[in-house]
Image (spheres, rainbow, N blue to C red):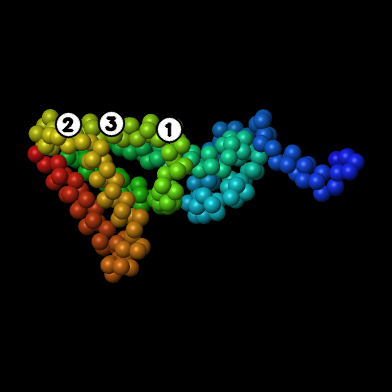
Amino acid sequence: MSEQIAGTPKAAVRRTDKKRKRGRPKARPNGGGPDMRATILQAAVKVFAERGLGGGRVNLVSRAARSNDRMLYYYFGSKEQLYVQVIEKIYRDMWEAESQLDLDLTQPVAALRHIVQFTMNHYLAHPELVTLLNNENLYKGKHVSKSKAMKELSSPALDLMEKVYNSGVKQGVFRKGIAPLHIYLTILALNYFYVSNRYTLSAFLGHDLMGDDLPHWRGWVEDVVLRALEA
């Protein structure tokens, strides 16, 4: 037990001890390692997607990861830094999946269709991505703007789009003068809007957007993008 200093209330001593115990660890806690870091990060994706940044408390993330708060602070420093790395992770996961597409750049129309299909499929398969991005947009990108990795994460995707577009221009199937950035934004926007607003729009329009309308929308997005590029 802590020895009480003369004239110091016991409650103050207890508070001092409590603060001392909460200090961030400077050395790796026992049981750490790359696997634990990845486990904590994946748990944070789930917790922040379900509860947002405000409701996603550190102890909930630790519990979901079967770890402890000390380990979380060791690897990420703070809840906000963990949240930023969660946003980085969902973008990185999307790009890594996109980079695995078997695209034939000599067939730019088919390659572009494949990218459009992949984007919708990824949003549907990863609802946590849509939820996390919606939440971060409520903060006006306050946290993601602090990320040093975001531009590095977007560059490969834009480079790929530029290669597909340039191939189409060279073959005479795509018209000149279109920014690859605008093509990519169009694909993201048309797919993201549909998925992120599916519940409210289904109620408003009286159509189940995840039912029979979904395949028609998929084809529509492909046609819109390709017709915008037609030479």
The local secondary structure at tag 2 comes to helix
Q: Amino acid at mark 1?
A: Ala
* Residue 159 circle label: 3
Callout 3 secondary element: helix
Taking the spot 75% from the left edge, 44% from the top edge, the residue there is 18
Q: Kindly identify the residue that appears in the image at 28 percent across and 69 percent down.
A: 206
Question: Of the numbered discs in the image, which one, if any, rests on residue 167?
Answer: 2
- Is residue 104 among what the camera can see? no
Residue 105, disc: none
- Compared across the picture, whether 115 is left or right of 151 comes to left
The residue type indicated by label 3 comes to: Asp
The CA span between labels 2 and 3 is 12 Å
Q: Give the image location of residue 161, x and y in percent.
A: 25, 35
- Categorize mark 2 by other alpha carbons within 10 Å: few (<14), some (14-19), many (20+): some
Secondary structure, mark 1, is loop
Determine which residue is flagged by label 1.
149
What amino acid is at disc 2? Ser
Residue 223, image x, y percentages: 17, 49
Return the residue nearer the eye: 50 or 101: 50
Instruction: Decide if residue 190 is on the left or right side of residue 80.
Output: left
Q: CA distance from mark 1 to mark 3?
A: 16 Å
Q: Name the residue nearer the viewer: 32 or 175.
A: 175
Horizontal arrangement in the rendering, residue 126 relative to residue 177 (left or right): right
Pair 1/2: label in front: 1
